[in-house]
């Protein structure tokens, strides 16, 4: 198996899962995400080197991708620019990593004699801000009006933000390579994923970021009024679904699945704060600012297609999942403290640059 972006959060969880099942795994990563070197160090310690690491970039290392695609039967394509905010400030890099990078992976698979399966990690952001779905505002959260419980794959696509556009373009390419070239591809439109090895930062990975902020006494920023609702999926459940798709590829090639925690695993930010203080004694200091572009007031994945075709559903509830992530963060407190101290410096630099830009404008 070739895992692009395999040194990142979902990547190292997937790699651990498949190594434990006896697979040969090659990680392909450009190590652009902070914390990835640490992830590989831990993997080397824990998994006794039963994997290979190739430093490469999906944007430009076409030959290398081609060579690797000849030697594998599955490509799990995770490599991406992952933050909406970064996509707004640097749309070209976002496009190159997400749209062009995915195109290069698909071409490597198409031209490979091995014709590997390609699993692609898309996002619920391809459905945009869901403006056509009426929402009601309750005391602690938004809810869908009219008894709707989730969003299925039949929801019209509505790319919003450069990240939504680049991931959405890639999502459609991956789907179409199954139609036009008969490549065995599957698209997963993922909700919010959380779990161990998540080096969350303000821009991405908010569950881990809020927990880390709570543990280290850092303030957090809320975009909007905190009533926005997300369905949370524990990373182990996600990775188990990848395996189901590989095992059932004859039935699911060319398909698209929404994957999330579903209606049983939703939280608004306000509810998340309450859970943290009541169950874990973590009290967060927060300030509010305006809603981010394309932010959905509520997203809940309708997982029924994944259940119908893959007999997959989430098994780890939010209370258990958050507890397990907190335990992992506490156990790695020292390493994380070093990482977030250097992260804090770079956040300060970015904030300073913003101030300089706005004073020039
Ligand atoms: N985490 C979530 O909640 C979530 C939700 C929906 C979709 N996704 C998708 O899942 C995938 C993995 O996300 P993650 O949370 O593990 O993010 P991550 O940032 O932890 O991992 C991404 C990895 O890709 C690598 N990378 C980035 N650009 C690259 C390039 N051009 N070439 C090679 N490697 C590159 C990074 O170094 C990093 O290791 C992404 O495609 C993301 O869009 C994640």
Image (tube, rainbow, N blue to C red):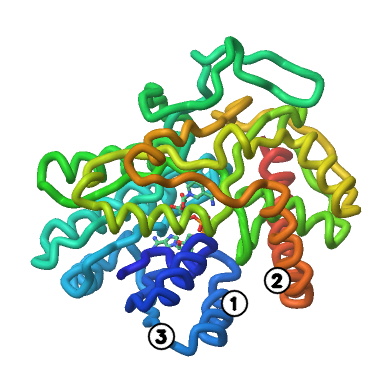
**Is label 3 in contact with label 1 (beta carbons under 8 Å)?**
no
Q: Is residue 172 left or right of residue 257?
A: left
Residue 112 horizontal/vertical position (percent): 12, 65
Q: Residue at x 20, y 70 (%)?
A: 63
Disc 3/disc 1 C-alpha distance (Å)? 17 Å
**Does label 2 or label 3 sit earlier along the sequence?**
3
Q: Residue at x 61, y 51 (%)?
A: 316
Q: Residue at x 37, y 59 (%)?
A: 243
Q: Which residue is mark 3?
A: 50
Residue 153 horizontal/vertical position (percent): 38, 30
**Is label 1 in contact with label 2 (beta carbons under 8 Å)?**
yes
Circle 3 — which element?
Answer: loop
Q: Residues within 10 Å of mark 2 (few under 14, many from 20)?
A: some
Residue 230 horizontal/vertical position (percent): 62, 36
Is residue 343 visible from the viewing direction of this image?
yes
Q: Is residue 231 left or right of residue 10?
A: right
* Comparing labels 3 and 1, the label whose residue is closer to the camera: 3
All told, the count of numbered labels is 3
Circle 2 — which element?
Answer: helix
Is residue 348 visible from the viewing direction of this image?
no
Disc 2/disc 3 C-alpha distance (Å)? 26 Å
């Amino acid at each position: 198996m070739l895992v692009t972006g395999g040194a990142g959060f979902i990547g190292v969880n997937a790699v651990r899962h498949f190594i434990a099942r006896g697979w040969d795994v090659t990680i392909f990563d450009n190590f652009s995400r902070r914390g990835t070197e640490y992830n590989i160090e831990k993997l080397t310690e824990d998994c006794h080197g039963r994997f290979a690491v190739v430093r490469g970039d999906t944007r430009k290392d076409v030959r290398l991708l081609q060579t690797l695609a000849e030697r594998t039967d599955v490509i799990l394509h995770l490599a991406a620019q992952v933050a909406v905010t970064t996509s707004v400030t640097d749309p070209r890099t976002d496009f190159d990593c997400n749209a062009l990078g995915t195109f290069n992976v698909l071409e490597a698979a198409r031209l490979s004699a091995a014709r590997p399966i390609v699993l692609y990690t898309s996002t619920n952001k391809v459905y945009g801000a869901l403006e056509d779905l009426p929402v009601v505002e309750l005391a602690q959260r938004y809810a869908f009006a009219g008894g709707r419980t989730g969003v299925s794959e039949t929801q019209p696509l509505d790319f919003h933000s450069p990240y939504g556009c680049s991931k959405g373009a890639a999502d459609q390419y991956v789907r179409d390579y199954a139609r036009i070239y008969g490549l065995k591809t599957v698209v997963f439109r993922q909700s919010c994923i959380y779990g161990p090895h998540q080096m969350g930062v303000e821009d991405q990975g908010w569950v881990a970021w809020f927990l880390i902020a709570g543990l280290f006494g850092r303030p957090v920023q809320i975009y909007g009024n905190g009533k926005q609702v997300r369905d949370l999926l524990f990373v182990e459940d996600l990775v188990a679904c990848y395996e189901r798709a590989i095992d059932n590829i004859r039935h699911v090639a060319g398909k698209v699945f929404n994957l999330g925690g579903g209606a049983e695993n939703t939280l608004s930010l306000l509810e998340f704060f309450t859970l943290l203080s009541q169950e874990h004694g973590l009290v967060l200091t927060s300030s509010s600012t305006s809603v981010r572009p394309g932010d959905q007031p509520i997203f809940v994945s309708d997982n029924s297609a994944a259940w119908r075709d893959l007999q997959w559903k989430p098994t780890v509830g939010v209370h258990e999942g958050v507890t397990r992530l907190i335990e992992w963060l506490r156990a790695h407190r020292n390493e994380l403290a070093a990482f977030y101290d250097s992260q804090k410096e770079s956040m300060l630099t970015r904030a300073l640059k913003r101030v300089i830009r706005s004073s020039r404008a």
